[in-house]
Image (cartoon, rainbow, N blue to C red):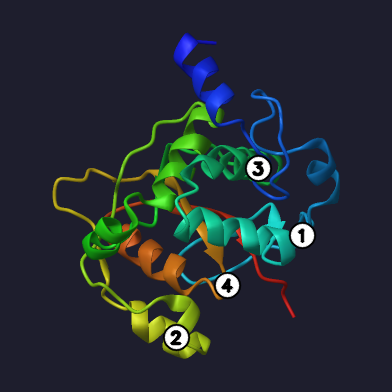
Amino acid sequence: MSFIRKLLDFLYPPKCAFCRKLVPADADGICPECKKSLPFTKSGDQVHGNFFTVCVAPLYYEDEVRDALLRYKFHQQASYCTAFGGLIADCVSERLTESIDLVSWVPLSRKRLRKRGYDQAKLLAEEVAKQLDLPCRPVLKKVVNTAPQSRTGSAEKRKANISGAYIVPENQNLEDLTILLIDDIVTTGSTLSECSRMLGMAGVKRVYCAAAAQKHRE
């Protein structure tokens, strides 16, 4: 461990992303108690949508998971990407058997990126790619600053809200690739479907998706 890392750990001791108790520097941001008690999804509980094969997520979006993700997205807790990214990587390894060519993410609009200061899905994708030893790069661009999907309402309204919001830049060569697309939270799958639709039009062979958390299926 570098001197700078040791100094930072001393000045800002790492805490569990979920319960916020102090944890060792090598704990990957999750304490042993939370590793046992978090609301983990079951392997068969997956999100399906149009244009992507399946979306897997390690956690349900509830209680301490919801609180941690809100801190991660809106309260400058970018370091939580280590905890969430590790959980996603483990979930992908366990539940997706086909080989992946490339990891990418659902990007923020330029306006929202300026406001937030970082793209939470990009940080997750980079962590997942590092742990799975896969290349990671942007393949999509968000060109419309849409209203947040969480405030949009029904699945039909979410689909309409996100339609046409993403493009694949012309310099991308994605022909016949299998891509793992990362987001933070998946609910109806509308955003992932729209992104996957655009990737398919650009020649991508197959899109798998993964998120940190999903809502319970009814």
Q: CA distance from mark 2 to mark 4?
A: 12 Å
Q: Amino acid at mark 2?
A: Thr
- First in sequence: mark 3 or mark 2? 3
For disc 3, the neighbor class at 10 Å (few under 14, some 14 to 19, many from 20) is many
Q: Residue at x 49, y 78 (%)?
A: 150
User: Mark 4 touching mark 3, by CB under 8 A?
Assistant: no
Residue 210 appears left or right of 87: left
Circle 3: element type: helix
- First in sequence: mark 4 or mark 1? 1
From the image, state whether disc 4 or disc 1 is nearer to you.
4
Residue that lies at the very extreme toward the front in this rendered image: 11
For disc 4, the neighbor class at 10 Å (few under 14, some 14 to 19, many from 20) is some
Q: Which dot marks residue 44?
A: 1
Q: Relative to residue 180, is residue 154 depicted above or below?
A: below
- First in sequence: mark 2 or mark 4? 2
Q: CA distance from mark 1 to mark 3?
A: 17 Å
Q: Residue at x 56, y 66 (%)?
A: 186
Q: CA distance from mark 4 to mark 3?
A: 18 Å
Q: Which dot marks residue 187?
A: 4
Q: Quadrant of residue 126?
A: top left
Q: How many marks?
A: 4
Q: Position of residue 121 (x, y in %)?
A: 44, 51
